[in-house]
Image: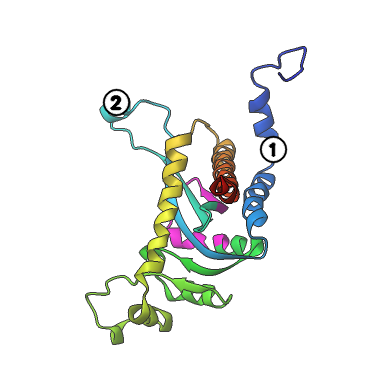
Amino acid sequence: MLSISIIPHFTTLQKAAARLSDILLHVAIGRFIQMICPSKMIFTGADTTGFETRHCTPYYSYRCFLRHSYTKLSAGSDMSTQLVCVVVIQHHPVSHDIKHFPEIFQQMTSIATPWIMVLDMGYDAEWIHQMIRGNNVLSMIPVRKKDDCPIRRTRGRYRKQMRRIFDESLYHQRNKCEAIFSVIKRRFGSDIKSYNESMREKELLYRVLVYNCHRMCVISCLLWMISREPKLNNF
């Protein structure tokens, strides 16, 4: 089927995967959303998940009291198409997720300017609102401990605004970030096989890239079915 006379060595794909640049993979991930909405993304969100980096069985780890290590992946996604736009990977997940948001937001605005951005309660900070609103984007982040203190004691202009006009229907769209991580882990695995940090990052980038390919196939099939629906109704 491939029209080749000699079968390549079984490590050909591994060597090619190690040779590709990380920058090229990041650019390829962002190209998917640019093909669908090249100018603006209407609804975006960001979240973080962890991938296990162990190479021993869970039973062995339990008996030897080994602590599970993991690699943290922060992703900014489009909620309408459920495509991953940008990815930030951290190999030593000891810092808070909020520290990586400026890099995620900067990369997302370089691809396409969003209109609305929803984040979970872990990103509740006044400077996060100021960064998002400063780029003419609506931020939707729930306020922590909103039942313990009145609105007048809430610090920050935009955090008080969230206490007054917080839209639950818009915020519930953020659940699609969890759905994206669930699909990636169920279909392509939740543990990392590579040993060094460079290959761990590339392995996660390849998984996100394959997920975007899978999602684009689903979107293409849906669009084809919609285009064929009027013709089918005529029969």
Residue nearest the observer in this picture, 232 or 144: 232
Q: Mark 2 or mark 1, which has the lower sequence index?
A: 1
- The label nearer to you, 2 versus 1, is 1
* Image position, residue 137 (x, y; %): 54, 74
> Could you say which quadrant of the image residue 169 lies in?
bottom left
Q: Using the numbered discs, state the Cα–Cα distance from disc 2 to disc 1 in whole angstroms.
A: 36 Å
Residue at left offset 55%, top offset 40%? 214
* Image position, residue 36 (x, y; %): 63, 56
* Image position, residue 158 (x, y; %): 42, 80
Residue at left offset 49%, top offset 53%? 74
Residue at image mark 1: 20
Residue at left offset 62%, top offset 48%? 29
* Image position, residue 95 (x, y; %): 43, 56
The relative height of residue 33 versus residue 67 in the rendered view (above or below) is below
Provide the secondary structure element on which disc 2 rests. Answer: helix
The relative height of residue 213 versus residue 78 in the rendered view (above or below) is above
| Left or right position of 155 against 99 | left
Residue at image mark 2: 59
- Asked if the magenta segment contains residue 115, the reply would be no
The stretch in magenta equals 84-104
Looking at the image, do the residues carrying marks 2 and 1 touch, with CB atoms under 8 Å apart? Answer: no
Provide the secondary structure element on which disc 1 rests. Answer: loop
| Left or right position of 145 against 28 | left
- Asked whether the viewer can see residue 77, the reply is yes
> Could you say which quadrant of the image residue 204 lies in?
top right
